[in-house]
Image: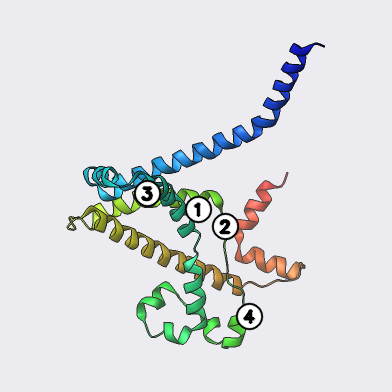
Amino acid sequence: MGPMVNFLEIIDTLIKRLSPFLAAGVVVGSLYWTAVTYGAITILQVVGHKEGLSVMENSDPLVLLIGLPAIPVGLVLGKMIRWEDAILRFLQNRRTVARKFPLLNLVLPISESEENETSESSLTTPILSDPVSATRILCGAILLPTVSSIVGRIFFESIQNNLHRTIIGGLAFITVKGALKIYHKQQQFIRKKQRKILDYNEENVTAYVSKNPRSSRSNQAQQP
């Protein structure tokens, strides 16, 4: 076919082999610079605009290239730590200690059936655990600095230092959110332990319909 066509075929084959690597490099580079930009915006938001610019201008460029993208990575990794489940499991295994504190009784209510159970039976009952959602973890980690800054400005306005105010606001938000999540999980735990599986017979169906008239009417309405 001639040297010109052979040269074009070699170039075409080389481009086909290099394109996946080039595309991967573009994607990785885009993610890296997006992380760098997010880290810089987070510093400006948490520390303050003037203070943040001063910190980044006086820092070493290598430190910024490594430290800025580490901010979103650290937020995502921190969001993946499910400390609420660990605290709930600890309190459930030590209910006698939890009863001594009135605040814990509000966050971690104990049903009557649980009070009559032994510790051995309570340990064998599985604890509810939500599946890990990648999108929820990512959104929660990205929005955490913004929410912390807003909470700090609303409830801790007396603190002059922007960094301290944002940190305290973030800790307050995480604590309140964790307490509500523990309360919700405990309620789900109690409901799960009280579930009963009954035979599908006429007696049980009649009893269910008498206790749940709304559910029976909705089921009848959905039938053709």
The numbered mark at residue 132 is 2
Question: Reading the chain from its start, which is encountered first: label 2 or label 3?
Answer: 3
Q: CA distance from mark 4 to mark 2?
A: 23 Å
Amino acid, disc 2: Val
Q: Position of residue 76 (x, y in %)?
A: 47, 54
Q: CA distance from mark 3 to mark 4?
A: 49 Å
Amino acid, disc 4: Thr
Q: Which residue corresponds to the image point at 55% horizontal and 71% vertical from the top-left?
A: 189
Which of the pair 141/100 is nearer the observer? 141
Q: Position of residue 123 (x, y in %)?
A: 59, 81
Question: Reading the chain from its start, which is encountered first: label 3 or label 4?
Answer: 3
Which of the pair 89/67 is nearer the observer? 67
The numbered mark at residue 124 is 4
The numbered mark at residue 206 is none
Q: CA distance from mark 3 to mark 1?
A: 26 Å
Mark 1, secondary structure of its residue: helix
The numbered mark at residue 137 is 1
In the drawing, does residue 71 fall left or right of residue 50? right
Q: CA distance from mark 2 to mark 1?
A: 8 Å
Amino acid, disc 3: Val
Q: Which residue corresponds to the image point at 34% horizontal and 48% vertical from the top-left?
A: 146
Q: Tell which tag, 3 or 1, sits nearer the viewer.
A: 3
Q: Which residue is mark 3?
A: 63
Mark 2, secondary structure of its residue: loop
Circles 2, 1 touching at the beta carbon (< 8 Å): yes
Question: Reading the chain from its start, which is encountered first: label 2 or label 1?
Answer: 2
Q: Residues within 10 Å of mark 1 (few under 14, many from 20)?
A: some
In the drawing, does residue 222 fall left or right of residue 47? right
Q: Specify the quadrant of the image occupied by residue 170.
A: bottom left
Q: Position of residue 77 (x, y in %)?
A: 48, 57
Q: Position of residue 172 (x, y in %)?
A: 32, 62
